[in-house]
Image: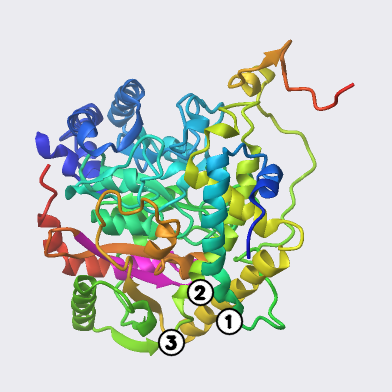
Amino acid sequence: MKINVKHTAKLANLPLSTREVKKFEGQLSETLRYIEGLNEINTDNVKPTDHVTGQENVLREDATTPSLSQKEALSNSKSKHNGMFKVKAILNE
Amino acid sequence: MSNLTSLTITQAKDKLRKKEISSMELTKACLERIKKLQGKLNVFVTITEKEALASAKEADNELRNGSYLPLLGIPIAIKDNFCTIGVRTTASSKVLDDFIPPYESTVTQRLKDAGIVMLGKTNMDAWAHGSSTETSDYGPTRNPWNINYLAGGSSGGSAAATAADLCIGSIGSETAGSIRQPASWCGAVGLKPTYGRVSRYGVVAMGSSLDSPGAITKSVEDAALILEVIAGHDPKDATSSNLPVPKYLLEIKNPEKKLKIGISGNYLEGVDVQVIKVFENTKKMLQKLGHTFVDLKLFDPKYAIDVYTILQRSEVSSNLARYDGIRYGNDRSFFGEEAKRRIMLGTFTLSSGYYDAYYKKAQKVRTIIINDFKEAFDKADFILAPTSPTPALKLGASQGKIMFGELADVLVEPSAIAGLTGINLPAGFSSDGLPIGMQFIGPQFSESEIINIAYSFEKETEFLKERKPNL
């Protein structure tokens, strides 16, 4: 199994150098070979587990509670404008 | 007063209450030792001296007023993946190099409410990805027993700080091994609670279905004390358990029961001969205490490596997707190589066309592992196994080995995948003078029982504590 590294990097929004793309092509295939051992295990009729302690339908009251102030929420941003996060345009004309 | 820093939490608490020492003296002694050894061991990413001295002063005032908070005035080191309001929290990654959280994690909030003095934030594998601290963007933490060796990880800074007496106790977090393995390599007590026993709120997320915050301490009693403070339901973490929190400190003193301890041969395969020797000694000691042994054949731990690799990478790719450098931190080009590799694999195993073959398959095998442990605990009360296949490895050992962490954690991964609790206890030394640890693994929410047996085992191994790292 070979991973399409460039495509996966795009999905992951990760900027990779040409050197990294080459490196990961080899390394990720190596990891996939390693974990192929799982195919030795028969999992027919086995249900997948995504939560281990059996908590179910954890709900809370649909009510507002105090949260970060606008100033606090923006306190770590390097790019803001008029009390808002400033982001790059995603649509071109 | 140089031996102040070697006190356990329980001992320090007693001395503070009796006014034999002040929190200020204790805190200054820790800070002095940190300053002396930080260059040598690289334990902290951030040292919060000013805040620590202010907290100590406040604690001394409260002590004078007769306040009875469980951790009042005790200097504690916190792993750098717990968000601390106003104090830089990096998770040892340059992506979060300048991140100052505007909110507090539930664990550190509970510790602060209990009166701790926070000494600083400890080094770890970046994003907790690893078992060496060598993936930290701030350099590896050295093992206090021999600085040419690794402290283990990912909570390597907290384990080293505890073993080297730079703090009185510390907090780590475990996804699969990150508390028990560094505790084993550094010679400390490391208690990994059941998944959901301790809130994950405000902990930089890694594998959300696995992450379990917990304590790394100098004694079992200290571990019980901290767990009692940090455990319990948290409305801010929907996966936290609402089961009541036992009084662990009282349970510890319960008369010991004679237990059936399970041993599985496949947990000893490929394990270093010196570790096996300590394992055999441990068995003898437990036999002397009147416990009996049951042979189990647990599901081969090698498959846990595969399951863990897939689940962890997948959850990592999802959790780390939020770091875009817009709201806080730096952009995605600041990720180190290990994080990039994990994000890439996880993105692949979750991607269209591969999800069933990898992620879903791993979740199914996870079910098999859970059921396997359930059957085992019908036959045995606990499982005894080495914590790590080897004593600490040399600096550089993880370099170029893309499965280093997974292989180093093979003996702790199955129980982590099943959400079980486990504890590492110092149990001996290698011929090179490096600590070797053993673990007890118990069913979910069996912390009381595990602390109880750990405490009785600790009493039999008090002699180990006479040996201290030569720093």
Q: Is residue B32 left or right of residue B47?
A: left
Cα separation, mark 3 vs mark 2, equals 14 Å
**Viewer-side residue, B345 vs B427:** B345
Where does residue B27 sit, x and y in percent of width and height?
24, 30
- The amino acid type of the residue labelled 3 equals Lys
- Highlighted magenta segment, given as a residue range: B435-454
Q: Secondary structure at mark 3?
A: loop
Q: Amino acid at mark 2?
A: Tyr
Q: In the rendered view, how is the structure colored?
A: rainbow
Which quadrant is the C terminus of chain A positioned in?
top right
Asked whether the beta carbons under mark 2 and mark 1 sit within 8 Å of each other, the answer is yes
Label 3 is found on which chain of the structure?
A: B
Measured in 3D between alpha carbons, the distance from the residue under mark 2 to the one under mark 1, in whole angstroms, is: 9 Å
Residue on which the image places disc 3: B297
Could you tell whether B149 is left or right of A33 in the image? left
Residue occupied by mark 1: A40
Please say whether residue B451 is one of the residues in the magenta stretch: yes
Q: Of discs 3 and 2, which sits in the foreground?
A: 2
Helix, strand or loop status at disc 2 = helix
Kind of element beneath mark 1: helix
Q: Which residue is mark 2?
A: B303
